[in-house]
Amino acid sequence: MRRLIITYVVFGFIVLCAGTTMAQATKAIWLVDDFEDGDLVLWNGPTGGCTVTNTALTGANASSRSLRIDGECGVFGGAWTDLGGFQATGVTFWVSPGSTFLKDSYVVLGDNDIETNFGIFYFNANSTSEFLVTTNSFSYSLGSYNNGQWYRVDLSLDWVGKTIDVNIDGVPRQRNIPFKTQSTASLTRLHFFNWNNSAGWLDEISMSTPAASTDVFGNGFESADTTAWSTAVPAQPQRLVLFDGGGMSGAIGGRSGADVMCGNAAVSMPGIPANATTRAFLSFSADDEILDMPGKHGVPTDRQVTGPNWNVIASDWADLLDGSIAMHLNSAGIQTETEFWYSGSLDDGSVSAYTCSGWTDGSTFLDGRYGSTYSTTSTWINNSEAKCGVTIYHVLCLAWR
């Protein structure tokens, strides 16, 4: 059963009230459902071939109960609840997928026409072992998951720009995902269903305006203080962004030509910080190799390395070049024409013997070392050799500020 909680943060104090409007409030949070009452009186469905229960077998965030769906529901054939019809700027829910090879745990937000327009936010645990958000033109990876594990998903909704930012367990995963349906004016429904014959769990659903901090339901207030709360806007974390600089037929043009490619690509690349420095992520010679980019080109070494979508590839520069990465580049938002990119490098970023003459020769009689965007082992940067001057082998770039 839903319990409506309106929480205001004013001048550092927390005031709890029900149905009261306060002009100076800075935060309001509605607990849609935490399922602790043991019922599903606020939920409709299912209409598909699945079952919906309020289970005491597991709950998110140290709670006791959750909503469980078993079986193959079909699209919108699971359970749904009414959200009230307003422009929430923050939505939080906890989800636990039942499988890493089946499609389950779909969470879809939208208006009363959601079953025909598919809502503004279309989320699921995919058969590729990664969370996805699907828009009308693209599927955005939110990173990998384990079945049977709870994950907290925080959404920040921009109703002017019609975009959504997504954090999972407090880590930014995607920024500026467009609403799937741009004409939606408010949230009135949340749907939860499975596509395949699997299981999925949902818990601790809340909405807020403005967006809830990541500590909202991590704080039970038992300490009788508000130290975990703040009205300050946190600074954007500094990071190194790895992104696709495109391909070129013929010679790349050495360091200067590759850097121009990166500068041009950064202009239209989502997720690149404004006024960023860009350099080609490429080894040219023993005097200019990826390994030495911090000393030669001023690349910071103490920042997380992410893709354009904020998914973390490595914890810092040393971790990036230790022979493996945390996530393959495609899931990090680096989606090239094929899976291959020129690196000219060995596992540790040192120069390979195959660099197409420092990337100044586009002759197919020469070879260039390349990496794979679908690998997390050393072959992500050191896969094999390919002919020079082939457009489908792209140049990758680094950006920072």
Image (cartoon, helix red, strand yellow):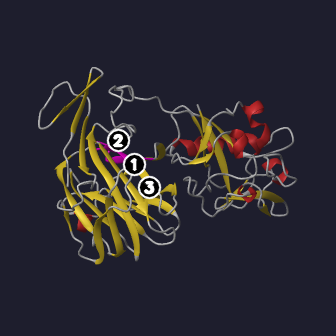
Label 3, on which residue? 150
Q: Is residue 281 visible?
A: no
Q: Are marks 3 and 1 in contact (CB under 8 Å)?
A: yes
Give how far apart the Cα atoms at labels 1 and 2 are. 8 Å
Taking the magenta stretch, the answer to whether it contains residue 346 is no
Please name the amino acid that badge 3 sits on. Trp
Residue segment shown in magenta: 153-168
| Amino acid under disc 1 | Asn
In this figure, what is the number of numbered marks?
Answer: 3
Instruction: Locate residue 95, reporting x and y percent.
Output: 39, 57
Secondary structure at numbered mark 1: loop
Real-space Cα distance between discs 3 and 1?
8 Å
Percent from the top left, x then y, of residue 239?
58, 36
**In the image, what residue occupies the spot 29% across and 74% down?**
51
Residue 332's disc number: none
Position of the N terminus by quadrant? bottom left
Task: Report if residue 158 lies within the magenta region.
Answer: yes
**Which quadrant does the C terminus fall into?**
top right
Circle 2 — which element?
Answer: loop
Mark with earlier residue (1, 2):
1
For label 2, the residue is: 217
Q: Are marks 1 and 2 in contact (CB under 8 Å)?
A: yes
